[in-house]
Amino acid sequence: MNKRPRAILSAATGIVVAASLAQAQQTPPRTDQVFRNVTTYLKDLSVDDFMETMGVISAALAFDCSDCHTNAGTDKVDWALDTPRKVVSRVMINMVAKINKENFGGRNVVTCWTCHHNRDRPASTANFETLYGEAPLIPDDVITQAQGGPSAASILDKFIEASGGAQKLASLKGIDATGTQAGFGGFGGGGAAEIAAEFPDKKATIILFRAETGRGDQIRSYDGKVGWVRTPLNVVGEYQLEGGDLDGARFDAQLMFPQQIKQILTNLKSGNPTAISDLPVSESQAAIQRQQGQATGPRTYRVNVVQGTGPRGLLVTLYFDQQTGLLTRELRYSQTSIGRVPVEVDFEDYRDVNGIKLPFHISYVWLDGRDSIELKDYKLNTPIAEAKFGRPAPMKKK
């Protein structure tokens, strides 16, 4: 992942957003209604799919938004201007689309990442360090059913039992957890965090930053049908979900209630067990490591793997700790016009809350940044204001 946060420039830098975006709509606007000078087949995307597409490009090339949208010789961002890099990117998008159409039936087998791998110019010569060094393990998005290992059903059954058991989980209808935000997009923490969920598929993640940060609030909400995103320093600021992000928001909401995990995905299969050793360490876990005289850092988890599919091509891989049976990582992929978009959610520091095991450290990784939340308190089955799951309230004027 690029060390610099991407796709997080302020709306104040000159983006042209249609006035219609300021109002909730039955049919969200298309890309060419929100942005100027969008050509190629990207102009008919939903706003969230377009933003994800830009994330795919910037991740593949290790670019910040400004690398393509800054007027030459200045530091001024002009989103509509046809800069040389922007012109080349259109050629590349059309080239990749043609390759996939003529060779792979239109499937996104070749993407920006295929050649670029986090650099602006694809490498064309063998590198000895890579050739003779220890190659990183890069698993395929789609896993193959493992032979001889535990079945997907048995892994999920173990998770349900480890989480508190089917009978106890059946009583879980609402979650309201509060804590602090420990990091966003490379800019550090500083926000009060709340994760609220209502059975079976409503969820809101609300982060209220301190006023002096100047970032505005970060809100992701889903009311069972409609989803919204408000992200600080984002080029749009706020938009309604319609594409792959909407499917991901629905799955994340459903996953808050483990009792339905066997119903929210289809085509379930188990992959070969593997190891995870890059999970962020929570503050409480680091404190325990220090008390025990251990070096602070990630632990290695041996995990069982389950994969399933959701609506409209949503692909989800779940990793369960072999020792505890608890969910360690969710890796989901939504489909855009130029390739899959990964979103990773890690769960750690499980504790007992009224007989149910719940994570107190949750981290999110997406193409444009990372977010880490340390939860301090859980309230179960308490009333939650319905407005929390709807469109975020208007931002307060300074």
Image: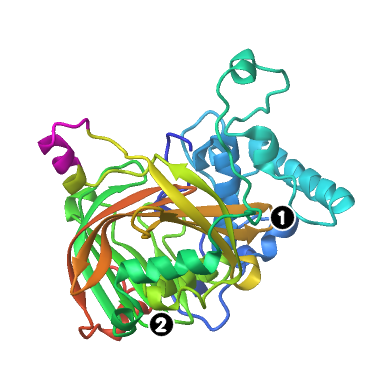
Q: Which residue is mark 2?
A: 200
As drawn, the residue found furthest toward the left would be 291
- What x and y, as percent, mark residue 364? 39, 53
* The quarter of the displayed image where residue 276 is located: top left
- Which residue appears at 37% of the width and 51% of the height? 233
Q: Residue furthest right?
A: 102
First in sequence: mark 2 vs mark 1: 1
- Residue drawn at (68%, 65%), measured in percent from left and top? 44
Amino acid at pointer 1: Thr
The residue lying toward the viewer, choosing from 308 and 159, is 159
* Residue 242 location, quadrant: bottom right
Foreground: disc 2 or disc 1:
2
Q: In terms of secondary structure, what is the magenta stretch mainly?
A: helix
Which quadrant of the figure contains the C terminus?
bottom left
Question: Residue 342 or 308: which is nearer the viewer?
Answer: 308
Q: Is residue 272 left or right of residue 366?
A: right
Q: Image point 48% across, 54% down: which residue?
A: 304
Residue 354 horizontal side relative to residue 151, left or right = left
Image position, residue 244 (x, y; %): 57, 65
Q: Give the amino acid at mark 2.
A: Pro
Count residues near mark 1 (Cα–Cα under 10 Å), then give few for <14, some for 14-19, many for 20+. few
Q: Can residue 398 be seen at all in this image of the molecule?
A: no
Residue range of the region highlighted in magenta in the rendering: 286-295
User: Residue 76 versus residue 287: which sits nearer the camera?
Assistant: 287
Dot 2 crowding, Cα within 10 Å, few <14, some 14–19, many 20+: some
Above or below, comparing residue 339 to residue 256 in the picture: above
Q: Is residue 6 above or below residue 305?
A: above
Tell whether 10 sits left or right of 312: left
Q: Secondary structure at mark 2?
A: loop
Q: Which residue is mark 1?
A: 39
Residue at the front extreme of this rendering: 148
Residue 314, image x, y percentages: 60, 65
